[in-house]
Image: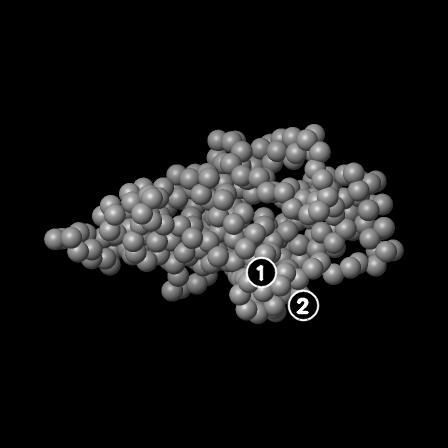
Amino acid sequence: MSATPQIPPISQIEGKTIIDLVANGRRLDGRGLLDHRGFDIRAGIIEKANGSAHVSLGKTKVMVGVKVEVGEPFPDVPDQGVLTVNAELVPMAYPLFEPGPPDENSIELARVVDRGIRESKMVDLKKLCIIPNEKAFVVFVDIYVLDHDGNLIDASAAAAAAALLSARINKFEVKNGEVSLLPETMPLPISNIPVTMTFAKIGGTIVLDPSLEEEQVMSSRLTVTVDKDGNLCALQKGGMGHMAIQDVKECVRLAIERAPQLRESILGAIGYGKD
């Protein structure tokens, strides 16, 4: 694992400006404290992938590809398919991203996105088992950060969800223990649609969807993932500062309250459910 790049310092005057603005209910880009930057979501952009999506969240840009292959189930869950999420932070996206093995930032990004998908049971993995103990579909979700302007987690989670929702896999048949893929396709078995929101604590104030400049002065962040029924299914605390219990409760409340609107925007952008 390569060394983890540190967040670059920000000038004292710029940092103080951001902190003072937030304390007075304002932000550098004019948003309210609890406003997301606009999501722009496009699905089906990679022809050879089973599913794909490109998401812009402000100037942050992320692309996700989904590839599905036939492999072996894990020994401890022999009746389920396999889901694996990877994230790559390429140098062209940010000066401090380095080529080579994944660092702590890319590992955290992949794990947070994976946890939201897995704990919400977005993909029904039992329906991806072909022959228990022997054959199952393996779903690879690959995240590529193209431009980093803050809050990679929310952009990546939305892109992963859109890519999975748009993915199609080959139908199959089993004869004499052999699996044959058919030319006809079917959608992935989707049973839930999680949405993820990240909050940052700047001074004593909570803001939603921190920009890169805000991440440079935040003391901590909290990522909340909510399923379609309004259930909390994943939490991730980041940063060196603390989050008071009341802060955590407020972030969870806000995420549950706002999740339906964000979910509808993702579904609407890719036309999911209109077929």
The disc placed on residue 95 is 2
- The residue most toward the right is 13
The kind of secondary structure element at disc 1 is loop
Q: Which residue is tagged 1?
A: 103
x and y, in percent, of residue 223 in the image = 61, 42
Residue at the spot x=25%, y=52% of the render? 135
- Cα separation between marks 2 and 1: 15 Å
Residue at the spot x=52%, y=31% of the render? 230
Q: Nearer the viewer, residue 190 or 95?
A: 95
Q: Quadrant of residue 99?
A: bottom right
Residue at the spot x=46%, y=38% of the render? 120
Residues tagged 2 and 1 counted as in contact (Cβ below 8 A): no
Q: Nearer the viewer, residue 50 or 248?
A: 248
Q: Label 1 sits on what residue type?
A: Asp
Query: Badge 1 local density, few (<14 within 10 Å), some, or many (20+)?
Result: some
Task: Classify residue 118 as left or right of residue 33.
Answer: left
Upstream in sequence: badge 2 or badge 1:
2
Q: Is residue 161 above or below residue 145?
A: above
Q: Label 2 sits on what residue type?
A: Pro
Task: Classify residue 14 as left or right of residue 148.
Answer: right
Task: Classify residue 114 as left or right of residue 137.
Answer: right
| Residue 216 shows in the view | yes
